[in-house]
Image (cartoon, rainbow, N blue to C red):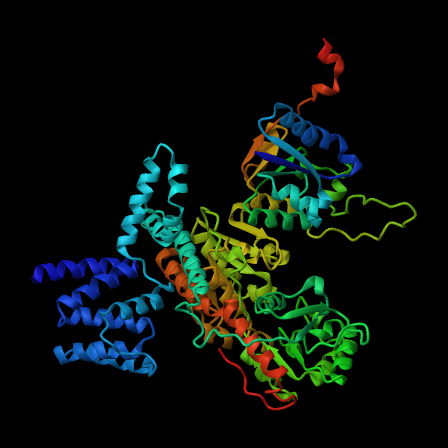
């Protein structure tokens, strides 16, 4: 019996080491059913629950292990960690029942349903029949419904085959596809995927007319484009303009404006609408007060001219509510009349490029995106990047959207550097997919400290591990990468670690992807709808101190 | 397979466009196994409805000569949509000397002569920065392959991309006497 137990535990640990969580969990759950007093298994399952964020169940498993092995000091530490995570809302039921295991798997893998082994066998059998059929097209056509039912299992068969063939890239791409399909299936069924922002998905109904007053509707920010799409999906009637003409244009029930000072003429429209008692939401996507004079966008968005500065002040004064993407930016606005709501940036799975498999490449692409920082930010770590490129002949620097930054690496040969131009918001996930490790260095400036976590969230949505400077929003996001505390050899060491360790990259990428699930527009859109709904119904009185929305 | 040749409308490119785009497109269509379209560079970069329709229906986009500025963005746009993109070029742009007219564009960054509409004054032109030669090299890392007209170009540009030689061909339809002979 002991030998059989050991064999099962070795198998489970092997799966764990290969990060094949589903298989590992399956083994250990079955061991616990057969050997409820096996301390190792209790500890491993406790670890699963701890990683899944269920402190209460983890603690109960650890306490049971401690009863069986009271001298083991390590268990005490595990109990303490579980207590820190303990969550009153989660049920500490016996963790071997199907629901608990399924829920745990959801939390660990980001998928809302585990795939039954029987389905996987059926899928493998079906695939085999199709491959060996004389008329595969006919067979597929005859089994369309079954293929639809077995879609996730069919992908799972291919993932396992890819792993067996040593094709991790293919396995990862298929895994992304599987998670995405799973999210969509869960969404269509009205279920909430495991990684959703906690709370109801029920959206408030908004029947009024919304006007988006934007500086240049042809060049909408990604934030406003996603917001518009989320509002339309929620059935809102939206008009988009850069000028409001009273008498000619119908009176809206609410106005959303974004960075209006960049088109000072637009502020006149805001004043007219405010006068007509139309509630106004002012969205500011960056901290313009602290924007450095040498910032690449300062000439277009900075408050350096009197016209823009006055327009900015006017916009703040007429707004009933201010929304921003980061907590630090909200704090910086505390001096103005209306403290700001924090509504983080999101991503939309309607954009197929988030789920599209990355094109295979032979090099490890270390990337920097020009919109995530300035040239001087990249200069902080340039020497570490060059050092890494000298150490690893299979690594290459990829610069996105900043030709000057690309020139910092002129000394490298052509095949060790790559420039990618910035394209539209829609194609940005495709651009990101060409990066294997994302770097986000930032100087210690008030403006940088107020930046949102958008770039890390986007990297997460694409499953890309990152290395970043620990600004407050990055500290809060934290998932899917490594924060590098000092501008010194830490950057070199951490980057080296990521270049060398593909498993680490993969596991950080998976964690990031799971965390980014909470920012899918289905959830971020709901935050917007809540705010809009409350403002329309005047549950949020204008010019009052408001509690910030946090995620 | 549907192939689209994307070419400039600049008068000084006309002969080379004939040899590197029109002749090839005619030949492909004449044989009939595959089909080929022609699309002008401006429509391609502006992503006009025509460009959307033609490129969207193509399997392979062949860009003649130019890879810079908005063309690079258009390349990324179509690469994201699973199109294979290659560049066809026929000049040793890295060896241009100031006495060769295209030196002004590739090396100095002076824009190509823009179309001047009747009665309109030509707009003041700013230099292209970084210069097109530099951007061309960036572009080669974005595309799937390059096709050139001589073996010397294959040798020179192979460090930047997979380069293949397809020499210039005559279109015998344009030489009735040859056909009669």
Q: Is residue B8 above or below residue A549?
A: above
Say which residue appears at 38% left-offset and 48% top-offset.
A147
Closer-to-camera residue (A281/A400): A281
Q: Position of residue A360 (x, y in %)?
A: 46, 47
- Residue A155 left/right relative to A317: left
- Residue B121 left/right relative to B140: right
Count all numbered tags in the image, as a single digit.
Answer: 0
Closer-to-camera residue (A502/A103): A103
Based on the displayed image, in which of its 4 quarters is residue A75 positioned?
bottom left
Q: Is residue B85 above or below residue A505?
A: above
Q: Position of residue A112 (x, y in %)?
A: 37, 64
Q: Is residue A17 above or below residue A92?
A: above
- Residue A400 left/right relative to A50: right
Q: Is residue A450 visible?
A: no
Q: Is residue A483 above or below residue B155?
A: below
Say which residue appears at 77% left-offset and 47% top-offset.
B110
Q: Residue furthest top?
A: B181
Q: Position of residue B50 (x, y in %)?
A: 70, 44
Closer-to-camera residue (B98/A468): A468
Q: Is residue B65 visible?
A: yes
Position of the N terminus of chain A, as image quadrant, is bottom left
Based on the displayed image, in which of its 4 quarters is residue A186 positioned?
bottom left
Q: Position of residue A119 (x, y in %)?
A: 29, 53
Q: Residue furthest left?
A: A1
Q: Residue furthest right?
A: B119
């Amino acid at each position: 019996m002991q030998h059989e137990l050991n064999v099962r535990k070795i198998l489970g640990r092997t799966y764990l080491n290969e990060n094949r969580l589903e298989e590992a969990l399956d083994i250990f759950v079955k061991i616990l059913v057969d050997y409820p007093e096996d301390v190792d298994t209790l500890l491993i399952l406790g670890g699963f629950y701890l990683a899944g964020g269920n402190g209460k169940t983890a603690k109960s498993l650890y306490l049971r292990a401690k009863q069986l092995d009271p001298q083991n000091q390590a268990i005490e530490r595990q109990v303490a960690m579980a207590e820190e995570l303990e969550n009153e809302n989660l049920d500490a039921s016996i963790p071997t029942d199907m629901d608990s295991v399924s829920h745990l798997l959801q939390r660990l893998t980001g998928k809302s349903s585990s795939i039954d082994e029987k389905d996987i066998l059926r899928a493998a059998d079906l695939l085999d029949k199709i491959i060996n059929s004389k008329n595969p097209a006919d067979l597929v056509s005859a089994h369309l419904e079954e293929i639809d039912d077995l879609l996730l299992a069919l992908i799972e068969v291919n993932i396992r085959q890819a792993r067996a063939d040593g094709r991790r890239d293919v396995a990862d791409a298929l895994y992304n596809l599987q998670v995405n399909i799973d999210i969509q299936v869960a969404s269509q069924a009205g279920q909430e995927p495991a990684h959703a922002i906690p709370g109801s998905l029920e959206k408030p109904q908004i029947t009024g007319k919304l006007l988006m007053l934007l500086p240049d509707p042809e060049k909408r920010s990604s934030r406003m484009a996603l917001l518009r799409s989320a509002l339309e999906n929620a059935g809102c009637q939206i008009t988009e303009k850069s000028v409001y003409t009273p008498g000619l244009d119908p009176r809206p029930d609410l106005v959303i404006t974004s960075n209006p000072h960049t088109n000072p003429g637009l502020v006149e429209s805001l004043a007219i609408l405010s006068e007509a008692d139309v509630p106004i939401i002012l969205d500011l996507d960056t901290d313009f007060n602290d924007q450095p004079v040498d910032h690449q966008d300062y000439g277009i968005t900075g408050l350096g001219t009197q016209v823009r500065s006055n327009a900015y002040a006017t916009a703040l004064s007429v707004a009933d509510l201010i929304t921003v993407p980061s907590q630090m930016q909200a704090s910086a606005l505390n001096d103005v009349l209306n403290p700001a709501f924090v509504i983080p940036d999101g991503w939309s799975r309607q954009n197929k490029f988030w789920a599209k498999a990355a094109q295979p490449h032979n090099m490890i692409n270390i990337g920097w995106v020009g919109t995530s920082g300035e040239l001087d930010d990249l200069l902080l770590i340039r020497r570490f990047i060059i050092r890494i490129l000298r150490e690893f002949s299979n690594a290459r620097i990829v610069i996105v959207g900043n030709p000057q930054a690309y020139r910092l690496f002129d000394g490298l040969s052509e095949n060790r550097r790559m420039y990618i131009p910035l394209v539209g918001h829609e194609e940005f996930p495709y651009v990101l997919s060409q990066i294997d490790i994302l770097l986000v260095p930032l100087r210690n400036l008030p403006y940088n400290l107020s930046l949102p976590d958008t770039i890390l969230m986007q990297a997460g949505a694409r499953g890309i591990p990152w290395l970043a400077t620990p600004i407050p929003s990055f500290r809060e996001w934290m998932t899917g990468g490594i924060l590098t505390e000092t501008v010194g050899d830490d950057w070199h060491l951490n980057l080296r670690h990521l270049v060398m360790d593909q498993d680490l990259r993969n596991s950080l990428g998976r964690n990031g992807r799971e965390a980014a699930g909470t920012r899918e527009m289905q959830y971020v859109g709901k935050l917007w709808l809540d705010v809009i709904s409350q403002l329309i119904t005047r549950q949020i009185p204008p010019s009052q101190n408001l509690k910030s929305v946090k995620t | 397979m549907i192939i689209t040749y994307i070419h400039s409308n600049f008068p000084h490119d006309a002969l080379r466009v004939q040899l590197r785009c029109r002749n090839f497109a005619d030949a492909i269509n004449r044989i009939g196994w595959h089909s080929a379209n022609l699309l002008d560079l401006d429509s391609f970069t502006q992503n006009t409805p025509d460009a959307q329709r033609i490129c969207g229906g193509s399997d392979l986009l062949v860009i003649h000569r130019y890879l810079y500025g908005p063309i690079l963005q258009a390349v990324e746009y179509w690469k994201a949509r699973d199109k294979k993109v290659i560049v066809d070029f026929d000049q040793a742009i890295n060896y241009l000397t100031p006495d060769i007219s295209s030196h002004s564009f590739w090396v100095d960054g002076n824009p190509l002569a823009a179309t001047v509409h009747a009665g309109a004054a030509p707009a003041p032109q700013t230099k292209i920065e970084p210069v097109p030669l530099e951007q061309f090299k960036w572009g080669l890392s974005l595309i799937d392959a390059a096709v050139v007209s001589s073996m010397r170009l294959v040798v020179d540009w192979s460090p930047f991309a997979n380069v293949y030689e397809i020499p210039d061909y005559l279109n015998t339809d344009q030489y009735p006497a040859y056909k009669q002979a």
